[in-house]
Image (tube, rainbow, N blue to C red):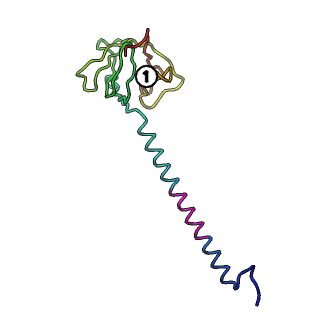
Amino acid sequence: MTSYRGYNSPHDSLDIYWETNCAKEKEDKMRHKLAAIAFGIALIALFAAVPAVRADTANEKIVFTVTVLVNVPGQVLAPGKYEMKFAEDGDYKVVQISTADGARPVGLFEVIPVERSRDLSQVEVEFTQTGARERPRLNEFFYPGDKTGYQFEYRGTPRT
């Protein structure tokens, strides 16, 4: 009788080879499924982390949502939905922030123009955080298609 590397017959080695490959294929399928699930969770987390922001270009109103306390010059925005637009007289140096329905004004804030090297296809509202223990603050905003945006002027320490 001829020996085939420790197996009794050629069929035994084929069965072992087949079983080993099946186990490897199952492991590969499981890895692919786990990678797809992880990718899906990462996408969901990415979209959940992006603040909801939209602009009404007719009157240059921006509606945004904050999920944590946020500083604006001299004020603190509680979590909620807000609208931001230039003051009624069309002055591009003063921005009015109010609740999203416009029912409760938060305040009027001075802004200065800032330039960016590229224009954006959508509205962008930028928040910054100066220290690990400090609240984020509303820093600047840009309208779609504009390289010029507006930066809030902070003087002193915001109220808490």
Q: Is residue 85 magenta?
A: no
Q: Split into 4 quadrants, where in the image is the C terminus? A: top left
Residue on which disc 1 sits? 135
Using a 10 Å C-alpha cutoff, classify the residue at mark 1 as few (fewer than 14 neighbours), some (14 to 19) or many (20 or more): some
- Identify the residue at image location x=28%, y=24%: 99
Which image quarter is the N terminus in? bottom right
The quarter of the picture where residue 63 lies is top left
Picture coordinates of residue 7, whole percent (x, y):
71, 81
Quarter residue 25 falls in: bottom right
Task: Tell me where residue 54 appears, x and y as whole percent.
Answer: 36, 31
x, y percent for residue 57: 35, 26
Taking the spot 54% from the left edge, 57% from the top edge, the residue there is: 32
Looking at this view, is 23 or 85 the one in front?
Answer: 23
Q: Position of residue 130 (x, y in %)?
A: 50, 20
Compared to residue 49, the image places residue 36 above or below, namely below
Instruction: Tell me what residue is drawn at x 37 percent, y 24 percent.
Output: 69
Instruction: Give the residue type that dot 1 points to.
Output: Arg
Looking at this view, is 88 or 125 the one in front? Answer: 125
Q: Is residue 129 left or right of residue 68?
A: right
In the displayed structure image, the side of residue 34 where residue 73 appears, left or right: left
Q: Which residues are magenta?
A: 21-33
Task: Give the number of marks.
Answer: 1
The residue at the far right in this view is 2
The reply, left or right, for residue 58 in relation to residue 122 is: left
Q: Residue at x 40, y 13 (%)?
A: 158
Which image quadrant is residue 103 in?
top left
Query: Of helix, strand and loop, which mostly describes the magenta segment?
Result: helix
Q: Is residue 149 above or below residue 80?
A: above
Q: Is residue 47 above or below residue 105?
A: below
